[in-house]
Image: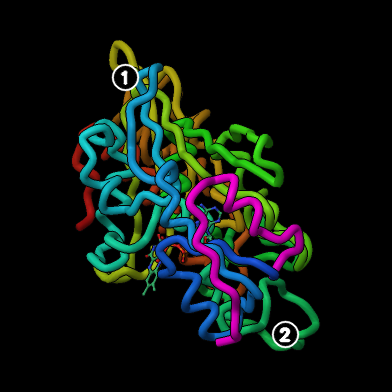
Amino acid sequence: MKLFEYAAPRTEAEVLQVLSPEFGKTEILAGGTDLIGLMKKMIVTPDRVVNIMNVPTLQGIEPTDEGGVRIGAATTLDVVRTSPYMKPYSAVLQVIAGINSLQLQAQGTIGGELCRRPQCWFFRNGEGLFWSSRHGTGERDDRYHAIFDNEGPARFVSPSRIAPALIALGARLRVIGPRAEDEQWVPASAFFQKPKHEQQKETILRPDQLLTHIELPPVDGWLSATYEVRQSVGPDAPLAAAACAFRHSGGIVREARIVLGQVAPTPWYSHEAVAALVGMPVTVETAEIAGQAAVQRARPLNNNAYKVQLAKVAVKRAILLAAGMNPGGF
Ligand SMILES: Cc1cc2nc3c(=O)[nH]c(=O)nc-3n(C[C@H](O)[C@H](O)[C@H](O)COP(=O)(O)OP(=O)(O)OC[C@H]3O[C@@H](n4cnc5c(N)ncnc54)[C@H](O)[C@@H]3O)c2cc1C
């Protein structure tokens, strides 16, 4: 590991003071379950590490005046999972339960989960995030890579498991910096981006900005669920996932949001699946049609066509689960 300075500020403003405007110079440390591994492998080599776990305003969950909840970015996944305020937000709770590792749940934070770096094995092997001439002309093993939005050099999948659920639930995120007075609330759907070059990351955060809070709107009759297709019960990344939230009346879906995970460089909002579901009753057949619609624009790479079927199934089962129906499978 490269030698680095360590800072442990006590306020949000102090965090901003010690962050560099240049990518790679400083890194924010929350639970450290992702960052420390990357630093040990010298994939990330900051001059300064900024621990945010001592900033009290970044911790905890509280109800908002509007009837929703506000979660501090440095709140651990375990605290999120067990908070009584989170009970109505099934889509989030199901994902955290699925992470299936007591250590990661106790140590990992929700902000770290949203900002963690891609799991792409070429990136984790020190080859960077982009398909390029560096990779040679031979076929790459892209079995875990994107099936949507995979033209061009960025073909990794967005690693966050919670992001699809937050987007489906209509969450917004508070970002501050570079100056203490700079504050913006960003829809969760606008927080993620497909980077175009090495000087861009997978979120809109600049190196001197901090994610401080995640705010969920009141549930207001919306039902939600996440379904992840996993290879095993361990803490591995799912192969495909979908989060779904909808509001219905008279048995008919009136509004819906359906977001796929692990299939594109960003969480993948499926307008096609939403269009297929709205105006319909939730049945096994309509859920199946929505799943089919969700994958109609999929363009698999050499080795990941199997993910198309998994993504379709994830959408179908997320819809059934949200409706309180048996999603099938095991
Ligand atoms: C064996 C293993 C298995 C794992 N499996 C999974 C899994 O299945 N699913 C999953 O989601 N994750 C998994 N992870 C990754 C990770 O542990 C979790 O996502 C965890 O929630 C990350 O939180 P953290 O607080 O430990 O993040 P950290 O490691 O502290 O930070 C992660 C990244 O986010 C940045 N960051 C953290 N907080 C902020 C903030 N508030 N503002 C701006 N940037 C910030 C950091 O600079 C860093 O780049 C796994 C990790 C390991 C070691």
Disc 1 residue crowd, few under 14, some 14–19, many 20+, Cα 10 Å: few
Residue to which mark 1 is pinned: 221
Amino acid beneath label 2: His
Decide: is 159 above or below 84. Answer: below
Decide: is 118 above or below 309. Answer: below
Q: Looking at the image, which residue is at 59% across and 32% down?
A: 185
Kindly tell me whether residue 117 is visible in this rendering. no
Q: Looking at the image, which residue is at 25% across and 63% down?
A: 100
**In the rendered view of the protein, which quadrant contains the N terminus?**
bottom right
Amino acid beneath label 1: Gly
Decide: is 116 above or below 47. Answer: above
In 3D space, how far apart are the residues under numbered discs 1 and 2 (Cα atoms)? 49 Å
Residue toward you, 222 or 300? 222
Tag 2 or tag 1, which sits nearer the N-term? 2
Residue to which mark 2 is pinned: 135
Q: Which region of the structure is painted magenta? A: 1-24
| Magenta stretch: helix, strand or loop mostly | loop
Kindly tell me whether residue 261 is visible in this rendering. yes
Residue 299 spot, x, y in % from top left: 62, 59
Q: Determine if the magenta segment contains residue 141.
A: no
Residue sitting farthest toward the top: 250
* SS for callout 1: loop
Q: Is mark 2 within 8 Å of ligand 1?
A: no
**In the rendered view of the protein, which quadrant contains the C terminus?**
bottom left
